[in-house]
Amino acid sequence: MKIHEYQAKEMFATYGIPVDRSIVCRSVEDAVKAYAQLDSQKVIVKAQVHTGGRGKAGGVKLADGEVELRRHAAAILGMNIKGFTVDRILVGQAINIEKEYYVSYVIDRSSKSPLLMLSKEGGMDIEEVARTSPEKIYKFVIDPSVGLPDYLAREAAFKLFDDIKQVRQAAVIFQKLYKLFVGTDASLAEINPLVLTKEAEIMAIDAKMTFDDNALYRHPKIAALHEPSEEEKKEQNAKSKGFSYVNLGGEIGCMVNGAGLAMATMDMIKLYGGNPANFLDIGGSSNPTKVIEAMKLLLSDQNVKVVLINIFGGITRCDDVAKGLLEAFKQIKTNIPIVIRLTGTNEKEGRALLQGSGLHVAHTMGEATRKAVSMC
């Protein structure tokens, strides 16, 4: 689960992490009132959306005076950034920045531990830094049974700073950020950038946090901040109907029984040059209602150009699955090509039932995948 920058900053402040003064606003007039409260000639105006790249999209602007603030606030509110409409902005006091740094905690699955990542290349796309200059990123695996003791916090801080006063400031911030990361069951706690000001102060002027969905029951106040996107709403709806769905943005809609087979199906689509639109595991049921709901979900995706149904009949019989599919398609009318591969128990009987149905029947997984890719 993601939260907005202003919400993350509120959490930072609660844990004693120094942040810039800022006020969230939902209108131009709110922004003007915030400007008066901040009592600063220059302010930063930032779009609040659940995605990165706000600056590149024009969603972050420096305003020098009320007139410029009004112009920037009006331009950013309502802006579309990577499919997200900006309905609120953060107006913050401009900071005299001397240097920018990157700091974050993530979960390192290989070591099964929190990982502290640091870089002197703050304010930039950290993925690009990792790709082009991996030596500029410092990593510290944190033993969860020990945490971040003083000596390790200072060792990390020395990677960014030379002045001992700044090292001490940064070490305290790293320790407080770690406590926040662990205490809220976060999967990411990021400061980009952490800045050194011209007044020799260190503070977080941006904040990003995501949380482990499986732990939200322990944090009702955090769970209440959840603002699901349209795709997340689809995933929640699918879960309520008994199957697992994740949108992937491709053009071949997948309906598969079994998570392992679903992943293999996506791999096959990529192998033959296509792009899966989703992960969709409908389980082992041949219930027509379930198939209908799954097809409605797939066809609601505007990117889907063909549907690939890949069914392995183990305990479930393929002829039962075929009957369920035929019943489902009596209720669903679509011009999108549908490729079906049935294999397993009673597969011949199942394929025979589908002959003449207008559906494209394949005998093997490779054949079905090639057909689907060719129809895009």
Image (cartoon, grey):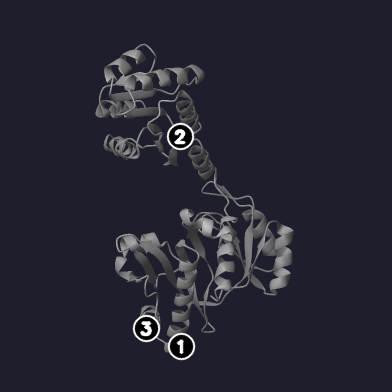
Q: Is residue 236 above or below residue 165?
A: above
CA–CA distance in space, label 2 to label 1? 54 Å
Say which of 203 and 64 sits in front.
Answer: 203
Residue annotated with mark 1: 165
Contact, mark 1 vs mark 3 (Cβ under 8 Å)? no
- Outermost residue on the front side: it is 315
Q: Earlier in the sequence, mark 1 or mark 3?
A: 3
Label 1 secondary element: helix
Q: Name the foreground residue: 121 vs 174.
A: 174
Q: Is residue 72 above or below residue 200?
A: above
Q: Residue at x 33, y 35 (%)?
A: 274
Q: Secondary structure at mark 3?
A: helix
Residue 318, position as x, y percentages in the image: 33, 22
Residue tagged by mark 2? 303
Circle 1 or circle 3, nearest the eye = 3
- The residue that mark 3 highlights is 151
